[in-house]
Amino acid sequence: MWLYAAKRVIALIPVLIGTTFIAFMVLYHFAPGDPFTFALGPYNPEWVHEMREIHGMNDPILIHFVRYISGVFTGDFGTSFRDHRLSITNEIMPRFMLTLRLSLAALSAALILAFPIGIAAAVKKSTWIDRASIFIAIIGISMPVFWLGLLLLGLFSFNLEWFPTSGAARWNSIVLPGIALGSGILFAMVRSIRSSILDIMRQDYIKTAQAKGLSNSKVIRKHMLRNALAPILKAFKLHFSDFFTGIVLVEVLFSWPGIGRLFIQGIAARDYPMILGCLVMFILFYAVINILVDIAQVFTAQVKVQ
């Protein structure tokens, strides 16, 4: 398992370089117009040339990229187009920690709730518990993140005034964006866990364990759940991409000062280093989560029992 983990971590390096190169080429080479002409106006050609020189945009594109990716691996994302004295690294890192805090809180709460609900729905198949969980899950999956966020803001912030409408300064600021962000993966995982548990329940070794007189809790814990973890983790990887795209929407809607909101601000200002820095952090975050899930799948395959 450790050899597999090392291989996956090493494989992350070319993935990061390749995806960064694509994003770099799209922004610096294929994007229409000039960002400095956009910011300074067409009547300042000397300033435009000076800014392009400062940011290395007058160099050949490959030399420019090699210089940029070398900086990324040393933790230097360059400087902002808005102010060449403003370090992108200093801007991104505090924002990324806030995005990480929101994401981990939403994921943790969603998975903690999804497992008992999904298991209960499978064990109580065709009962009101099963029907209610499926009904709520279908509604939750069908509900767009931004619409759910607006409902939460309208009810709990504007009407009841229980939670703040924006920011991350207060301890309860994370509650509403966390619910909006985690709801999609919560309801998707409830269905996946229910389906995986039902498949395991049909296996002969489960019937044998039940015939031996083992309690339901022991059968679920020692047989069903262990063997259902592999398909559950596979389903999580599929649903995580949807969760990932919701981060930007939630941060903008709730004015959460993370890199999703910073990414949108960078697009509005045509600040290419800011946009690219946020993209690199998103790519790294997504790739690390996928590696951790893959390692967990290998580990569960080794401890799988019947």
Image (spheres, rainbow, N blue to C red):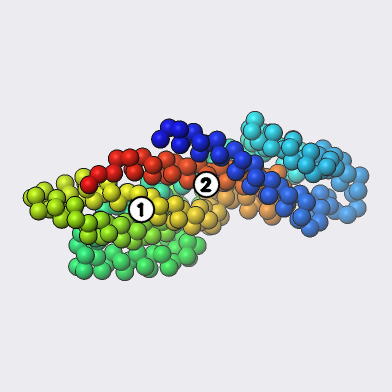
Q: Residues within 10 Å of mark 2 (few under 14, many from 20)?
A: some
Residue 92 in picture, x, y percent from top left: 61, 40
Q: Is residue 91 visible?
A: yes
Discs 1, 2 touching: Cβ within 8 Å: no
| Residue 87, quarter of picture | top right
Residue, x 64% and y 33% (percent of image)?
A: 73
Viewer-side residue, 200 vs 32: 200
Q: Is residue 230 above or below residue 86?
A: below
Q: Is residue 137 above or below residue 55?
A: below
SS of the residue at dot 2?
A: helix
Which residue position holds label 1?
231
Viewer-side residue, 203 vs 59: 203
- CA gap between label 1 and label 2 equals 20 Å
| Residue 3, quarter of picture | top left
| Residue 89, quarter of picture | top right
Residue 244 in picture, x, y percent from top left: 50, 53
SS of the residue at dot 1?
A: helix
Residue, x 76% and y 55% (percent of image)?
A: 30
Residue, x 41% and y 49% (percent of image)?
A: 106
Asked if residue 19 lies left or right of residue 213, the reply is: right
Q: Residues within 10 Å of mark 1 (few under 14, many from 20)?
A: some
Which residue position holds label 2?
286
Q: Amino acid at mark 1?
A: Pro
Residue 142 in picture, x, y percent from top left: 43, 68
Q: Amino acid at mark 2?
A: Tyr
Asked if residue 294 lies left or right of residue 283, the reply is: left
Asked if residue 245 lies left or right of residue 179, the reply is: right
Total numbered labels = 2
